């Protein structure tokens, strides 16, 4: 039974991810509503549907393990979501808000990529090949989402910078007195 400790860790990590994904299912609609860009809003909405699929895949793994997915609170995701909520309250607008939302979303994606990479490796070591293929699918989707966010960020960050430069220029212009 040398793998018993590792199996417990594996299940614990899966529970953490399950809770993280469920927290995201609740948070993504808020991000979508806050987004100024239609493209970013659509991206958040698409990722919400994908995240629901992640929850379903994790539930399938828990069924195979004959374990309950409940019982663990993912504090890391809770903190990342709280930071994302704070971004929405900073008073940013337009492309600047979108740039901040993308930053918050990418931190979430990187956290998930790390978590799924870890459980995939543990699953491989434990010989859980059915689980590993499901975890690999999720991991690839998380990486694709991160890449899409990076692409959007290039455009949105440039717009945010241009808006900021325009505001600086407008402040430099002498004010006309009527």
Image (spheres, rainbow, N blue to C red):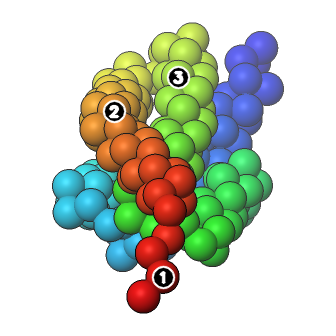
Which element carries disc 3, helix, strand or loop? helix
Between 12 and 101, the residue placed more toward the observer is 101
Residue 55 showing in the rendered view: no
Question: What's the residue at 45%, 75% (across, down)?
Answer: 176
The x, y position of residue 68, in whole percent, is 58, 59
The residue that mark 1 highlights is 177
The residue that mark 3 highlights is 117
The x, y position of residue 130, in whole percent, is 34, 27
Question: What's the residue at 40%, 52% (across, down)?
Answer: 166
Q: Please, is residue 126 above or below residue 8 in the view?
A: above
Judge left or right: residue 147 versus residue 86: left
The residue that mark 2 highlights is 154
Indicate which label's residue lies in the foreground, 1 or 3: 1
Between 159 and 176, the residue placed more toward the observer is 176
Q: Neighbour class for label 2 at 10 Å: few (<14), some, many (≥20)?
A: few
The x, y position of residue 103, in whole percent, is 53, 44
Residue 35 showing in the rendered view: yes
Question: What's the residue at 66%, 39% (across, down)?
Answer: 13
Q: Considering only order in the chain, which callout, 1 or 2, is on the residue closer to the N terminus?
A: 2
Judge left or right: residue 63 versus residue 9: left
Which element carries disc 2, helix, strand or loop? helix
Which element carries disc 1, helix, strand or loop? loop
Indicate which label's residue lies in the foreground, 2 or 3: 2
Q: Neighbour class for label 3 at 10 Å: few (<14), some, many (≥20)?
A: some
Judge left or right: residue 53 versus residue 65: left
Q: What distance separates the C-alpha of mark 2 from that of mark 1?
A: 39 Å
Between 156 and 72, the residue placed more toward the observer is 156
Q: Please, is residue 6 above or below residue 149 in the view?
A: above
Question: What's the residue at 38%, 64% (across, down)?
Answer: 94
Q: Considering only order in the chain, which callout, 3 or 2, is on the residue closer to the N terminus?
A: 3
């Amino acid at each position: 039974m040398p793998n018993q400790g590792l199996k417990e860790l594996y299940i614990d990590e899966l529970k953490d991810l399950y809770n993280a994904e469920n927290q995201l299912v609740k948070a993504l609609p808020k991000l979508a509503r806050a987004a100024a860009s239609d493209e970013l809003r659509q991206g958040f909405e698409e990722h919400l549907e994908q995240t629901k699929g992640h929850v379903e895949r994790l539930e399938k793994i828990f069924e195979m393990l004959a374990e309950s997915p409940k019982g663990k609170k993912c504090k890391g995701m809770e903190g990342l979501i709280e930071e994302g909520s704070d971004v929405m309250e900073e008073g940013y607008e337009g492309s600047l808000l979108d740039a901040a939302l993308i930053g918050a979303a990418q931190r979430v994606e990187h956290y998930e990529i790390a978590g799924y990479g870890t459980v995939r490796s543990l699953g491989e070591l434990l010989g859980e090949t059915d689980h590993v293929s499901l975890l690999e699918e999720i991991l690839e989707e998380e990486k694709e989402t991160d890449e899409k966010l990076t692409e959007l960020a290039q455009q949105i960050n440039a717009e945010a910078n241009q808006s900021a430069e325009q505001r600086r220029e407008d402040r430099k212009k002498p004010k006309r007195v009527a």
